[in-house]
Amino acid sequence: MKLKLGIPKGSLETATIDLFRRAGFSITTSSRSYFPGIDDPEIECMLIRAQEMARYVEDGILDAGLTGRDWVEENEADVVAAADLIYAKQSFGKVRWVLAVPESSDFRSAKDLQGKIIATELVATTKRYLAKQGVTAKVEFSWGATEVKPPVLADAIVEVTETGSSLRANKLKIIDTVLESNTQLIANKESWKDEWKRRKLEDMKMLLEGAINALGKVGLMLNVHKQSLQAVLSVLPALKRPTISHLSDDDWLAVNTILDESTVRDIIPRLKQAGGEGIVEYPLNKIVL
């Protein structure tokens, strides 16, 4: 038996393959094949655009796949959200689909777009959003380069953003958030009922979440004389609980902890000054909570 798994092709492809690598799976792609190799004989991968993933999972062509919650909602797909994987191309966080208009325009809210043209790739979701706002507007599908369409080809756009930098570069301002989204591991309902496939997916979920938990974290271990232990502990963040163990010399202890990578460059010199010795920083692939 094999689990048929969809890997998102396009903007999330590299981040997804790197996340799987951190989780312990090696996925290899080829520019001439839509069937990546994976070092797990029980999994069969296929590259599918994130926009289409939910439909193929719902129909059972795939047992599971990774895609954005935005595309699940856009397709109104009836699938199981097996895991929320909060990562994205740049920030490993959530993304927003926003309603944006030219900076020079007088548009201040969705209601100002009555009878106007809105370009987006997220057509169905945008129509539902406008209906809730009581606004009737023409929603056109955009094949790409959506940010350059206002004001000539459209009055406004609904576009995905992480930082807003691309919108600002195109002299657009955000007037509302239409939808927040993050990457999900989704599963076909029948596949989720299958005991073997569900266990396989739950194991995968645990490893992927462990890899996400380790992002931006490093391990730190050092030796310290008993007399300097409190001085060393006072340097470490108050909420961290390091592991302390005895060395072969009863007067010395080993301290092991996990820290935010961004803080380590400030902490290591202070640990040395406090009496820490043999300080080792090491990378982490997974933290399973």
Image (tube, rainbow, N blue to C red):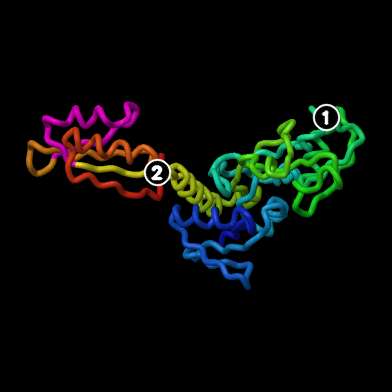
- Tell me: 129 left or right of 180: right
Q: Residue at coordinates 43% horizontally, 56% vertically from top-left?
A: 24
Q: Residues within 10 Å of mark 2 (few under 14, many from 20)?
A: some
N-terminal of the two: label 1 or label 2? 1
Residue at image mark 2: 287
Quadrant into which the N terminus falls: bottom right
Which stretch is magenta? 223-246
* Mark 1 surroundings: few (<14), some (14-19) or many (≥20) residues within 10 A: few
> Residue flagged by tag 1: what amino acid is it?
Asp
Along the viewing direction, whichever of 117 and 135 lies nearer the viewer: 117
The residue singled out by tag 1 in the image is 106
User: Is residue 120 toward the left or the right of residue 286 in the image?
Assistant: right
Q: Does residue 151 show up magenta in the picture?
A: no
- Camera-near label (1 vs 2) is 1
The image position of residue 43, as x and y in percent, is 54, 62
**94 or 91: nearer the eye?**
91
Q: Is residue 160 above or below residue 103?
A: below
What separation in Å lies between label 1 and label 2 (alpha carbons)?
49 Å
The location of residue 199, given as percent across then percent down, is 51, 50
Write the residue at 60% across / 45% down.
Answer: 184
Q: Amino acid under label 2? A: Ile
Above/below status of 109 relative to 99: above
Of residue 90 and residue 60, the one placed in the foreground of this image is: 90
Secondary structure under tag 2 reads loop
Task: Locate residue 18, reporting x and y percent.
Answer: 50, 56
The location of residue 105, given as percent across then percent down, is: 82, 33
The answer to whether one can see residue 70 in this image is no
Q: Quadrant of residue 165?
A: top right
